[in-house]
Amino acid sequence: MPVAAGIGFFGLLFAALWGVAALVAHNGADTTERLTPAFQEMGRLDSIALAIAQGGPIILPDLVGNDRHVVLDHTGDDDLRSWSLHLAHPADRDSSCAIQQIERTRQFTDCDGRTLEVADLAEPPQGVSPIINRKAGTLTLSLRETPATPSTTPTS
C-alpha cells in the first residue's frame, strides 16, 4: 500500500508539473519572452572582440530556434559593420549540414568536408543582428526575426 501511494503521489506531481508547463507554453503554439528571449546579452565589446581575435568566430547554439545555430564574428574596428551574425551552415545548404570550426581559425568545415570562410555561411533571418551599445561598451544580439513586408504591385 505505501508503494502504491508513493507511485500515485509522483504521478500526480508529474501531471501537475506538466499542466503548468503546458499552460506557460500555451501548448507550444505561442512562444513568449520567458521561453525564447528576443535579445541575448553577450557582454563587453572588448572582451568578445579579443576572444574572437584569439580563437576565431564564436558558434552560439540554437539561439534563433528551429535548430539554427548562430556564428558571431568580428573584424576590424568596433563599429557595427565590423560585427556580423551568420547561421552555422553553408549558404548553399540547409541547417542539416552543420559546420565545425577549425580550431583557433576563422575557417569551418561543413558536412561535405569543404573548407568555408565566414562569408560562405548562410545569412540570418531579417531582424537577427548584433546591437552595439557604445555608451555601456556592450554587445547584444537581436534574435527576433522580423517578418518581411510584402511588396505591393500597383494594379491598373
Image (cartoon, grey):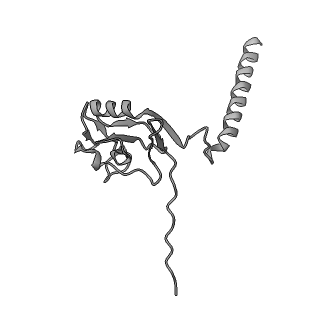
Which residue lies most toward the bottom here?
156
Quadrant of the rendered image containing residue 17: top right
Which residue lies most toward the front here?
135
- Number of numbered labels in the structure image: 0
Question: Image point 41% across, 36% down: which residue?
Answer: 60
Image vertical order of residue 127 relative to residue 54, above or below: below
Question: Image point 40% across, 35% down: which residue?
Answer: 45
Instruction: Give the image location of residue 101, x and y in percent.
Output: 29, 36
Question: Image point 68% across, 27% down: which residue?
Answer: 14
Instruction: Give the image location of residue 155, x and y in percent.
Output: 52, 84
**Which quarter shows the N terminus?**
top right
Image vertical order of residue 139 relative to residue 152, above or below: above
Q: Relative to the observer, which residue lies in front, 44 or 114?
A: 44
Horizontal arrangement in the rendering, residue 139 relative to residue 32 (left or right): left
Question: Image point 32% across, 52% down: which residue?
Answer: 91
Horizontal arrangement in the rendering, residue 19 relative to residue 33 (left or right): right
Quadrant of the rendered image containing residue 68: top left
Instruction: Give the image location of residue 13, x and y in percent.
Output: 72, 25
Instruction: Give the image location of residue 126, x and y in percent.
Output: 45, 54
Q: Relative to the observer, which residue lies in front, 150 or 141?
A: 141
